[in-house]
Amino acid sequence: MLNTILAEANEFSVEVAQAWSKSIMLGLALALAAIGLALVGSNYMKALGRNPEAGKAASQIIIIAAMIEVTALLAFLLGAFLL
């Protein structure tokens, strides 16, 4: 009887640990992606304020932002569906 209770307790704690690890991984990945996008946007606006002619090269910034978004999406998919 005691072995059954301990086995169930260990299974539950493993499931809880897996859920916590997924949550922490997803939270960190999405939070850091948001911080990265904020830094890219902020620095782009600073540069645009200093040199308004540089606004024509906005395609490079969009590509960098898209790479950050893809990284966040892959982290979400990995955490939510594969683990």
Image (cartoon, helix red, strand yellow):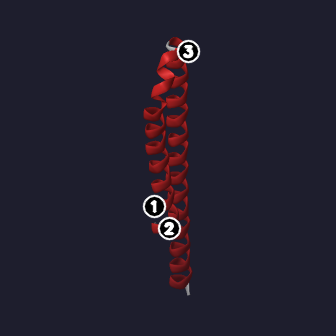
- Looking at the rendered structure, the kind of residue marked 1 is Leu
Distance in Å between CA atoms under marks 2 and 1: 6 Å
Distance in Å between CA atoms under marks 3 and 2: 42 Å
- Sequence-earlier tag: 3 or 2: 3
- Helix, strand or loop at mark 2: helix
Residue under the image location 45 percent in, 61 percent down: 78
- Looking at the rendered structure, the kind of residue marked 2 is Phe
Label 3 CA crowd tier, 10 Å (few <14, some 14–19, many 20+)? few
Cβ–Cβ below 8 Å for labels 2 and 1? yes
Most distant residue in the bottom direction = 1
Whole-percent x, y for residue 67 in the image: 43, 44
Give the vertical position of 66 relative to 7 (above or below): above
Instruction: Pick whichever, 4 or 12, lies toward us.
Output: 12
Give the vertical position of 9 relative to 52 (above or below): below
Q: Which residue is mark 3?
A: 49
Q: Which residue is mark 2?
A: 81
Instruction: Name the quadrant containing residue 42.
Output: top right
Question: Which mark, by number, is residue 19?
Answer: none
Camera-nearest label, 3 or 2: 3
Cβ–Cβ below 8 Å for labels 3 and 2? no
Q: Which residue is mark 1?
A: 78
Give the vertical position of 2 relative to 71 (above or below): below
Residue under the image location 53 percent in, 69 percent down: 15
- Helix, strand or loop at mark 1: helix
Instruction: Pick whichever, 61 or 71, lies toward us.
Output: 61
